[in-house]
Amino acid sequence: MQHRRLGSTDRYVSEVGLGTWNIGGGAWGEVPEETALDVVHTALDADVDFIDTADVYGDGRSESIIGDVLAEREDAEEVFVATKAGRRLDPHEADRYNFDELESHVQRSRENLGVDTIDLLQLHCPPTDAYYQPSTFDALERFRDEGLIEHAGVSAERVEEAQKAIEYDVVETVQIIFNPFRQRPRERFFEDAARYDVGVIVRVPYASGLLTGALDRDEEFGEEDHRNFNREGEAFDVGETFAGVPYEVGHDALEAMEPELPGDRSTAEATLRWILDHRQVSTVIPGTTTPAHVEDNAAVSEQPRLPNRVHGAVRDVYEEYVYEHVHHRW
């Protein structure tokens, strides 16, 4: 496993991390606790030492599972855990992103994770107006000053939000969607992040499974799976589901892209490698409920970069099939 520096945190973390939205249940359907625990253990055994979670993943279940696993392991001190806060605010409004409103959420996450100090707290896709309120980021500074968190960042929906966030000194990391179907961050944000010494955490690398090549056009998803109930953004930002790409369009793009990928790699492997080939990426956080997939994801770190020809072909597919649906939105 290769490691990369996570911005000004000065921590070196595994370039392939673990996203735990899936194992929290809820938006991905129910996941047995034994399976969830096994996923986390498998990741740590594969030298993954960056884990991302949030207080809304299973309403704290994901955090608690991580806490339970770390309590059992001798290597717990080597693991860097990032969580998020803000999406439990109801109503979810910009002016509620302040210390008083968020403190109880942060305290709950500390208890769930079993830690005194959270390694990294990220604001969880706040409304755009929150990025223009200094009080939003004053809250992060206070959490840090009071020892509740060690580092702070944001999980952003849009490139412009990410660009605004890094103007605040307290922000050391930005989490954003980036994959072959969501390429705008590399044009408009990556160089800014490098200039501000901000770590880049890539989420939704597989576009909700589309970029694994494992989904059929007529795939059926459970009622509690966001790929069923959020295709039009009914529950949260539609960009989180299939990366905002209409499902049929995604399959058209995938059919055009797959023949251009190296024959000795799966679509999922090539997708992760494509992301890691961008030097500004600090870590990518694929999620899964299958331990074997965790091992496959981790192994991509040791694969060679993709040929320039493949990068060019992926760009061509994006421009022909996907660009008009996503580029101007996120």
Image (cartoon, grey):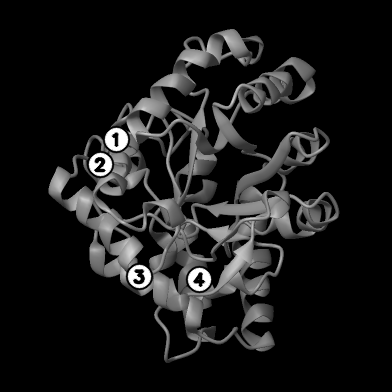
Q: Is residue 232 above or below residue 191?
A: above
Secondary structure under badge 2?
Answer: helix
- Which callout, 2 or 3, points to the residue nearer the camera? 2
Q: Determine whether label 3 and label 4 are within 8 Å by CB.
A: no
User: On the picture, is 86 further left or further right than 173?
Assistant: left
CA–CA distance between discs 3 and 1?
Answer: 21 Å
The residue depicted at 67 percent of the width and 71 percent of the height is 315
Rendered image: mark on residue 68: 2
Residue 133, x across and y down, in percent: 77, 17
Q: Is mark 3 on a helix, strand or loop?
A: loop
CA gap, disc 3 and disc 4: 19 Å
Q: Residues within 10 Å of mark 1 (few under 14, many from 20)?
A: many
Please name the amino acid that badge 4 sits on: Thr
Nearest the viewer among 255 and 123 is 123
Nearer to us of marks 1 and 2 is 2
* Residue 69 percent across, percent down from the top left: 26, 48
